[in-house]
Amino acid sequence: MSSAINRNRQLSEPTIARLPVYQRIAQEMLRRGLTKTDSKRLGELAGVTAATVRRDLSGLGPLGTRGSGYDVQTLEVQIDEALGHNRLYDVVIIGLGNLGRALAGSNNFLIRGAQIVGLYDVDPQLIGTEIAGVTVRDPRDGISPATIGVICTPTEVAQETANALVEANIHAILNFSPMVLEVPVGTAVRYVDFSIELQILAYHLTNGTGPLGGGLLRTLGLTTPPVAARPS
């Protein structure tokens, strides 16, 4: 069993959720020619304390010389390994409405090592056509073997779709449908609900708070002008 898998089992869910943020910061630092950083700077950019950064990264193995900060290249590589980006993943997308088609054609959706091997929809006008070089098929004819299944279907058929993925021996599901799925033990489900994210943003706007404090956004060049308050 690889050391990466052993490390992953020791990481908490909040730590796992923060690792991609640290990695994105490291990638931007490398792009700018920076080779060293420290927990204080990473914390400022990620919107967490330096102690949280040190705790999060402590399970990834040596990342530099003690007292001299983190080697940015090593940090990026170690996070990549911990998140499993050095493996290969076959992905299928079920439901090719606006969102499903956008994901299938996006260059930013897939992680390193992932490839779309199947696109599925029940719309007769879509079946047999190609999206991003992949032929759309009817999921009722069976779903091809894959590592990850992405659900972009209407809510009323999301559970049925999840059942079909499990029957196809796909036990990692990314669900964009606003429904809590019932899946057997051993099947991992992650939920992406844009309405919930908007509600959280609205809360921070209303209360003048923010989990990232804008540091990461500034680093990535994604800052925007302040949002004007809606007239009362």
Image: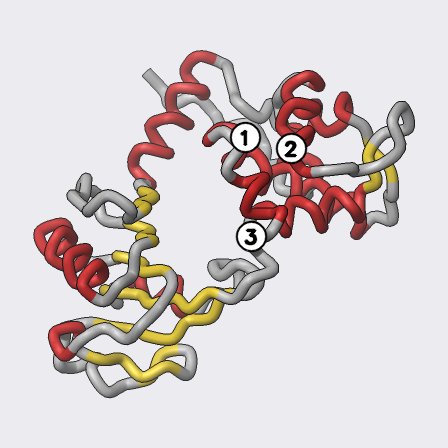
Sequence-first disc among 2 and 3 = 3
- Residue sitting at 38 percent across and 26 percent down? 200
Residue 162 placement (x, y as % from top left)? 19, 55
The label shown at residue 15 is 1
Query: Of the residues shown, which amino acid type is indicated by label 2?
Result: Gly
Q: Nearer the viewer, residue 101 or 70?
A: 70
Mark 2 → mark 1, Cα distance in angstroms: 10 Å
Please tell me whether mark 2 or mark 3 is closer to you in this view: 3
Q: How many marks?
A: 3
The picture places residue 1, in percent across and down from the top left corner, at: 56, 52
Could you say where residue 160 lies in the image, as x and y percent from the top left? Answer: 11, 57
Q: Is residue 118 left or right of residue 65?
A: left
* Residue 159 in sight from this viewpoint: yes
Could you tell me the amino acid type at mark 3? Met
Q: Is residue 218 above or below residue 91?
A: above
CA distance separating discs 2 and 3: 16 Å
Disc 3: which residue: 1
Dots 2, 1 in contact, CB < 8 A: yes
**Numbered disc in front, either 1 or 3:** 3
Q: Earlier in the sequence, mark 2 or mark 1?
A: 1
The residue tagged 2 is 59
